[in-house]
Amino acid sequence: MKIKENNFAFIDSQNLYRGIERLGWKLGFNRFRTYLKDKYNVTTAYLFMGYIPENQDLYSSLQKSGFILIFKPTLVREDGKTKGNVDADLVLQAMIDYNNYDKAVIVSSDGDFYSLVKYLYKNNKLKIVLSPYTQTCSNILRKEAKEKIVYMDNLKKKLEHKKNTA
């Protein structure tokens, strides 16, 4: 009997949200967490995001779905948009936990993760890169992930948020 892998997911939540939004559908986070567990043997799923106090209900819902939330303080830019840059936190957590997982699942299209992906790939610790949106996926990220990249545009049926029908 084959022992299941103990894989960890490191998710850039803003990149995931924006990428799926560009595809024209909403991600069902409950369904996404189940997908990660069933498809990639993800036992621990970190969701990196900027902290906004008004979003407490969302955070509770994500935790109930099985995500571990890692918050970054946010900044309000001059244009009024809120920014919570999580890249360094995601990379740091992937390295802190390096000996605790068999393989990593990276969820982002952001080229800032190319060095992490390159290192994980070289050391046989990369399970897959899930890129939310093909058009905005960094070429350098594609290059380093090689054959271990999957685009989420064909996962709508499996992962789309279903509205409750009463």
Image (cartoon, rainbow, N blue to C red):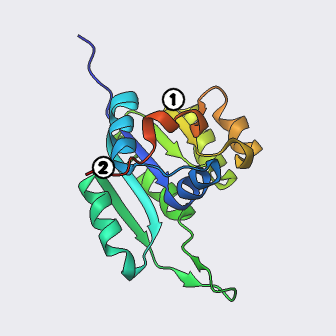
Q: Who's the residue at 31% across and 51% down the image?
A: 164
Mark 1 element type: loop
Asked if residue 109 can be seen in this view, the reply is no
Considering only order in the chain, which callout, 1 or 2, is on the residue closer to the N terminus? 1
Crowding at label 1, few (<14), some or many (≥20) Cα neighbours within 10 Å? few
SS type, badge 2: loop
Left or right: where 141 falls relative to 116: right
Please tell me which residue lies in front, 22 or 127: 22
Which quadrant of the view contains residue 153?
top right
Looking at the image, the residue that sits furthest to the right is 139
Residue 61: x and y in percent read 29, 61
Residue 1: x %, y % from top left: 23, 10
Of tags 2 and 1, the one toward the viewer is 2
What residue is pinned by disc 2? 165
- The answer to whether 92 is drawn above or below residue 131 in the figure is below
Drawn side of residue 21 relative to residue 11, left or right: right
Residue at x-position 59% and y-position 45%: 132
Q: In the rendered image, which quarter is residue 120 located in?
A: top right
Tag of residue 53: none
39 lies above or below 138:
above
Which residue is tagged 1?
124
Residue at 29% over, 24% down: 4
The x and y percentages for residue 156 are 51, 38
Q: Mark 2: give few (<14), some (14-19) or many (20+) Cα within 10 Å.
A: few
Q: Is residue 166 above or below residue 85?
A: above
Q: Amino acid at mark 2?
A: Thr
Q: How many marks?
A: 2
